[in-house]
């Protein structure tokens, strides 16, 4: 059976141009695709639990796909993770910027019941520039992730075996979304200038901003990064 005739479950986030481009490429190369999209906090659609087929392709999905669903993929369940193997979990770009990483990347791997733990298929890496912030790093990583997705679909379309990477996950840097919201974004009243600059670079993105909490009252940073004049 060719890849074009396989049954694929495509899981991704809603209203994202990058995800729609990935889906568009997939549907040009596969005739039977079931689509499940959602955002943080959305329930898993019921059709995901009733699906049976050949491949699950999870592309920046906001759900942890249950093991019962993974077992319904006859050939394979593959995730496209917007971070390198040393950055499993959520908030990959944020912590890479905070820790001053010189390199970032994206990862394609087989899925297991444990998040970002399955055998790695392929990784694509690129440098982090000193001028990068959350917005620019996410934009580049999502572009590279789309390239990786198209590469993997092309390999499946050609009937070739998926690559096997020698890289492994580094679990010491595993973070959750709650780590970002409750720890990294939260600043103290006596924070140093250097630490504040690190946090601003790593967390300021759209409505997500550093904040200070005093006596139960939350004060959220208002200025855009370009307008910030942090002074001694």
Image (cartoon, rainbow, N blue to C red):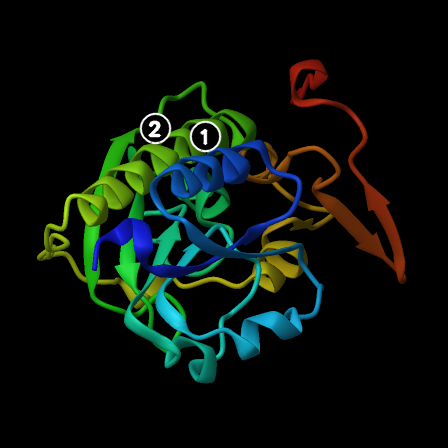
Measured as percent of width and height from the top left, residue 183 is found at 61, 58
Question: What element does badge 1 sit on?
Answer: helix
Residue at figure coordinates x 49%, y 79% from the top left: 66
Measured as percent of width and height from the top left, residue 196 is found at 60, 37
- Residue 2 is left or right of residue 229, and the answer is left
Residue at figure coordinates x 64%, y 70% from the top left: 44
For the residue pair 97 and 69, the one nearer the viewer reads as 69
- Residue 210 is left or right of residue 68, and the answer is right
Measured as percent of width and height from the top left, residue 218 is found at 86, 52
Q: Residue 128 carries which label?
A: 2
For the residue pair 115 and 185, the one nearer the viewer reads as 115
For the residue pair 19 and 209, the one nearer the viewer reads as 19
Instruction: Determine if residue 85 is in view.
Output: no
Q: Which residue lies furthest to the bottom in this view?
A: 68
Write down the residue under mark 1. 137
- Residue 70 is left or right of residue 62, and the answer is left
């Amino acid at each position: 059976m060719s890849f074009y005739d396989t049954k694929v479950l495509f899981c991704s986030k809603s209203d994202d141009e990058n995800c729609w481009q990935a889906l568009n490429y997939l549907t040009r190369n596969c005739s039977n695709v079931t689509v499940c999209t959602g955002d943080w906090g959305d329930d898993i659609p019921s059709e995901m639990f009733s699906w049976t087929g050949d491949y699950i392709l999870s592309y920046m999905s906001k759900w942890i796909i249950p093991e019962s669903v993974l077992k319904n993929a006859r050939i394979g369940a593959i995730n496209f993770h917007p971070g390198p193997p040393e950055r499993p979990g959520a908030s990959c770009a944020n912590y890479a910027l905070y820790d001053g990483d010189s390199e970032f990347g994206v990862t394609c791997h087989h899925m297991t019941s444990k998040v970002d733990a399955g055998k790695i298929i392929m990784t694509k890496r690129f440098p982090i520039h000193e001028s990068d912030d959350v917005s620019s790093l996410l934009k580049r990583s999502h572009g590279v992730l789309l390239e990786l997705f198209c590469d993997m679909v092309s390999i499946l379309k050609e009937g070739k075996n998926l690559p096997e990477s020698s890289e492994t996950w580094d679990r010491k840097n595993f973070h959750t979304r709650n780590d970002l919201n409750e720890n990294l974004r939260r600043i103290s009243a006596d924070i140093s200038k250097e630490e504040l600059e690190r946090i601003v670079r790593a967390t300021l993105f759209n409505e997500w901003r550093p904040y200070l909490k005093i006596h139960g009252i939350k004060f959220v940073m208002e200025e855009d990064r370009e307008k910030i004049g942090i002074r001694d």
